[in-house]
Image (spheres, rainbow, N blue to C red):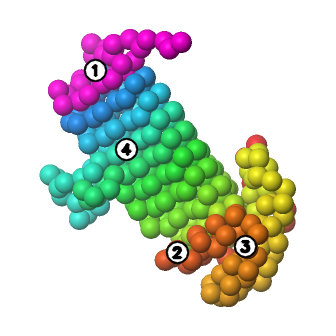
């Protein structure tokens, strides 16, 4: 049995452009401003006082809190008023909290993209052309520069920062206040600038990763990271160990595809990646 959704609701104090498309169940709260080609899919909730500029698409069941600003032009000197942009695409079941900013793409080919089930906490920012995967958490004050990439299920703790064109691999955990100007490998924890401190063991366990895969990642980490090998030697070690492990193979593929330097190992004691 399915529940019928109501017609869109628009508060009298809100402004909604004629080009906007609002699907069933959408609620636009007081003092919201929607300009241009904005598509709000079913059951999107705009609490109040948020600003949306198209081209912008927001997926089903996403909630946007006050003073969030989505889809405004990129902070890029090369981008001029009127330049073509692919805008922003935000997935379904996201939570976009107060003061969040997501800027539009700097070119028309690919939008700035926020995946499904993403939690962007207060005052977090995704710059132009950023790509945020599914299930990511950006804690208060997280800053993603332009052209950055977070793969799925990344946690960026409060006040953490990622430099332009850098990547954070799947299920990695960046500790509070840490700035990264390098690529952060998947399944790992960073506790200091540009370093990897250990494996995100707590995150792996919570995700239901089998014990044998975690053991394989531990062995790969000891053999490839703790000895500070050159990239090609590191890849050779990981390829050898990855014959029986999908996650070690994924780790190797991430490193092989990178164009930026890779975070280097620094021992900080036991690193669990526990956000509690």
What label sits on residue 14 in the rendered view?
A: 1
| Location of mark 3 (residue) | 242
Q: Work out how far the residue at label 4 is from the one at label 3, CA to CA, in angstroms.
A: 35 Å
> How crowded is the residue under tag 3: few (<14 C-alpha within 10 Å), some, or many (20+)?
many
User: Residue at horizontal 33%, vertical 23%?
Assistant: 23
Camera-near label (1 vs 2) is: 2
Q: Where 105 falls versus 248 (above or below)?
A: above
Q: Of 54 and 238, which appears nearest the observer?
A: 238
Q: Is residue 202 visible?
A: no
User: Residue at horizontal 30%, vertical 33%?
Assistant: 39
Camera-near label (1 vs 3) is: 3
In the figure, residue 42 lies in which quadrant? top left
- Is 232 displayed left or right of 107 in the figure? right
What label sits on residue 258 in the rendered view?
A: 2
Q: Is residue 262 visible?
A: yes
| Location of mark 4 (residue) | 89
The part of the chain drawn in magenta is 1-30
Kind of element beneath mark 2: loop
> How crowded is the residue under tag 1: few (<14 C-alpha within 10 Å), some, or many (20+)?
some
């Amino acid at each position: 049995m399915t529940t019928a959704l109501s017609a869109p609701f628009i508060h009298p104090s809100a402004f909604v452009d004629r080009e906007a498309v609002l699907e069933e169940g959408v609620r636009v709260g007081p003092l919201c401003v929607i300009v241009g080609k904005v598509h709000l899919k079913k059951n999107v909730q705009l609490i109040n006082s948020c600003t949306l500029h198209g081209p912008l698409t927001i997926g089903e069941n996403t909630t946007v809190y006050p003073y969030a600003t989505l889809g405004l032009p990129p902070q890029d000197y090369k981008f001029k008023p009127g330049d073509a942009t692919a805008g922003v695409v935000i997935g379904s079941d996201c939570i976009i909290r107060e003061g969040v900013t997501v800027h539009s793409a700097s070119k028309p080919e690919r939008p700035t993209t926020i995946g499904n089930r993403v939690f962007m906490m207060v005052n977090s920012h995704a710059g132009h052309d950023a790509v945020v995967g599914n299930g990511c958490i950006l804690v208060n004050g997280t800053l993603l520069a332009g052209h950055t990439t977070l793969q799925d299920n990344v946690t960026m703790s409060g006040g953490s920062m990622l430099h332009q064109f850098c990547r954070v691999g799947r299920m990695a955990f960046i500790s509070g206040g840490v700035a990264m100007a390098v690529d952060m490998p998947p399944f790992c924890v960073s506790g200091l600038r540009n370093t990897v401190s250990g494996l995100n063991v707590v995150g792996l366990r919570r995700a239901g990763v089998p014990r044998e895969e975690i053991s394989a990642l531990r062995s790969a980490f000891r053999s490839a990271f703790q000895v500070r090998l050159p990239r090609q030697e590191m890849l050779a070690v990981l390829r050898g160990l990855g014959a029986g492990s999908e996650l070690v193979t994924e780790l190797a593929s991430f490193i092989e595809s990178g164009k930026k330097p890779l975070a280097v190992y620094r021992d900080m004691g036991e690193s669990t990646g526990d956000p509690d």
